[in-house]
Amino acid sequence: MANAASEQRIWVKVLWRLAAVLVLGALIGPALGGYANGVLFVMVPYVSWHIYNLYLVERWLRTGNISDVPDSWGIWRAIFDRIYRLQQAERLRQRELGKIVRRFRKSSAALPDGVVVLDDAFRIDWFNDAAKVLLGLKKKKDVGQRISNLVRDPHFFEYLATEDYSRPVEIGVSDQPGVVLSLLIVPYDSNQYLLMVRNVTRLHKLEQMRRDFVANASHELRTPLTVMKGYVDALDDEVDSLPKHWQKAWKAMSNQTGHMQRLVRDLMVTLRLEDKLLTGRDETIDMVRLCDDATRDLKALAEPDVGIEYTLSAQTLLRGNVTEIQSIVANLVSNAINYMPKDYEPGQGKVLIKWRVNDKGAELVVKDNGAGIPDEHLPHITERFYRVDNRPGRLQQGTGLGLTIVAQSVTRHGGKLSIKSKVGKGTTFSCQFPKDRVLTATDGNLLKAG
Ligand code: ADP
């Protein structure tokens, strides 16, 4: 307020001074042969003084020595003061900013993880010491280079191209066999990026050890289990002649060996899916036929208690691995039947299998009107060995691996599994497959699919 008032006062003074100059011109005008001559006579030095001051400002700003404030008075003194104060404030701000940047660089340089600052075209602006070591970057040579010219890995190229940076990508290092780096792009500001680099070799080794252990244990268990199950099944015909308590024991043995066999089988499938070892060729799949094949045995077991209905588009074909897609359908449908409440009347339980084209590609839906899954379990339902409760199902005791296999297989096909459920109403599993995996039936590809 005070500043505004003093500025107003300065301008009042300027106007008064101008008025005084004009009055002076008018007074001496008659002596110079007219009012206009008088005004011109006083205005020339007045305007010249202003031009001179303009020259002083321009020279002052050009030479750049801001503490050399030109000497003047009146409005020009106020202007020079104002410019000087603004420049001082700006310098202070820059100094503060410089301090912040230096502090940020020092702290980022000390980070054990690599940090690379990238511009909107993924060119390197800056990187810390850890990034230098992990990615083999060179300070002078590599600043301004595109990161994809320096980190030459097909997985990283794909990661940059997909523009989905919600998860990191893992890459190997060409000159250091066995070393695995995890790279994560973090977008910030508008179109600026941070690339975070971590050495995850140790984690990878641990993960590999876990897989090797599970694979070996499952493999070793398979033979003794087959032998045990063989003997248990061989007793099937004679079980009625056994004493009552042995009949009970036989039933428990038969159930448990069956459960362990399923567990070992499912474990091996999840491991092979993780290691991408199910490398069967992609084929053009006739989904009508596949759903029929995958559910024939289940249908026989379920009906008439649980009805299975199909709404399948014969025109829509899927390019994928038959074994994996079959296991998706079989797992989802067997779950739908398995977890149908046991107190339902015959025919009350319904499972609907849909296969249809949509704007994102095509969708496989398995919907039931069963018990539903409580909300708190939904985020975990595809985790390994996760089970909502240990109630035995209608068909068999679960292993907690079925939905893990489904989720892994859908992801391997570039798809997305989503689950909607309401307790007491039922559950809908939807596998959305991308457009590049979906074909429309023509004579040529129908022949292949058949
Ligand atoms: P499981 O071998 O136990 O069936 P899954 O991974 O297939 O393992 O399923 C995990 C859990 O999710 C199951 O234990 C079950 O409680 C629940 N679940 C799966 N599908 C359904 C469904 N259609 N209706 C109700 N609950 C389900």
Image: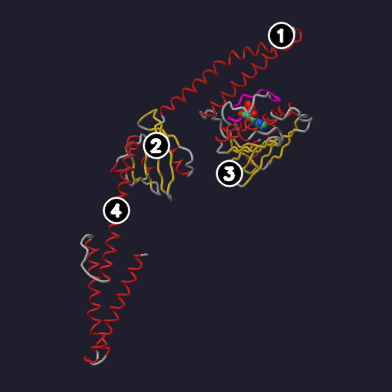
Earlier sequence position, callout 1 versus callout 3: 1
Earlier sequence position, callout 2 versus callout 3: 2
Where residue 443 appears, as percent x and y from the top left, is 65, 42
The residue carrying mark 3 has its beta carbon less than 8 Å from ligand 1 = no
Ligand 1 shows up in which quadrant of the image?
top right
What is the image's colouring? secondary structure
Whether tag 1 and tag 3 are in contact, CB under 8 A, the answer is: no
Residue 400 lies in the magenta-colored region: yes
Looking at the image, residue 412 lies above or below residue 399: below
| Residue 376 seen in this snapshot | yes
Q: Secondary structure at mark 2?
A: strand
Amino acid type for the residue under numbered disc 2: Val
Crowd band around label 2 with a 10 angstrom C-alpha radius: few (<14), some (14–19), many (20+): many
Mark 3 vs mark 4: in front: 4
Extreme-front residue of the structure: 2
Earlier sequence position, callout 2 versus callout 4: 4
Whether tag 3 and tag 4 are in contact, CB under 8 A, the answer is: no
Crowd band around label 4 with a 10 angstrom C-alpha radius: few (<14), some (14–19), many (20+): few
Residue nearest the observer in this picture, 95 or 265:
95
Residue 444 occupies quadrant: top right
Q: Which residue is mark 3?
A: 435
Earlier sequence position, callout 2 versus callout 1: 2
Q: Which residue is mark 1?
A: 246
Amino acid type for the residue under numbered disc 4: Leu
